[in-house]
Image (spheres, grey):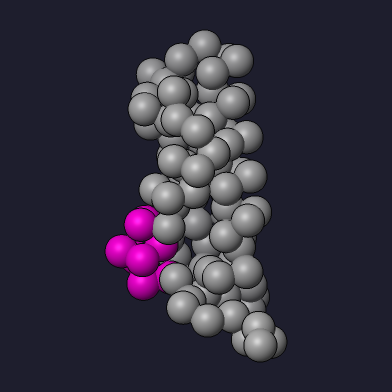
């Protein structure tokens, strides 16, 4: 993660061949992308993130991936507890 001056967060996804064949790598990236899409409103703005898939994501569900991303965002202090405009 690196700060940017854009006022919004950009996220990149990658998976090496150690994760599995092309089908498995694409599934891993899709899972991470969908989980991040759902969590994006709660991410602090102004950061560039690169998320790297590891082998366990190949057998994970969307909820498992989302939970892992939440933990990473909290550990990186990029998680907002409340979203502005939520009443």
x%, y% of residue 68?
39, 48
The residue sitting at 54% across, 39% down in the picture is 62
x%, y% of residue 59?
44, 23
x%, y% of residue 69?
44, 52
| Total numbered circles | 0
Image: magenta residue range: 71-78
Picture quadrant of residue 17: top left
Location of the N terminus by quadrant is bottom left
Whether residue 84 is visible here, answered yes or no, is yes
Residue at the extreme top of the image, as rendered: 21
x%, y% of residue 30?
62, 35
Residue 71 as seen in the image, left or right of residue 83: left
Please determine whether, in this image, residue 18 is positioned above or below residue 65: above
Residue 85 as seen in the image, left or right of residue 32: right
Residue 7 as seen in the image, left or right of residue 66: right
Residue at the extreme front of the image, as rendered: 87
Residue at the extreme left of the image, as rendered: 75
The residue sitting at 66% across, 88% down in the picture is 87
Please determine whether, in this image, residue 17 is positioned above or below residue 13: above
Whether residue 4 is visible here, answered yes or no, is no
Residue 12 inside the magenta-drawn segment: no
Please determine whether, in this image, residue 20 is positioned above or below residue 40: above
Question: Is 55 or 11 nearer to us in this picture?
Answer: 55
The residue sitting at 61% across, 44% down in the picture is 33
Magenta span: predominant SS is helix
């Amino acid at each position: 993660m690196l700060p940017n001056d854009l006022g919004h967060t950009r996220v990149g996804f990658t998976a090496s061949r150690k994760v599995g064949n092309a089908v498995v790598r694409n599934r891993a990236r899709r899972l991470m992308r969908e989980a991040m899409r759902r969590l994006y409103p709660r991410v602090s703005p102004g950061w560039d993130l690169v998320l790297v898939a590891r082998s366990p994501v190949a057998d994970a569900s969307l909820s498992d991936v989302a939970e892992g991303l939440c933990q990473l965002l909290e550990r990186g202090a990029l998680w907002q507890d409340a979203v502005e405009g939520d009443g």
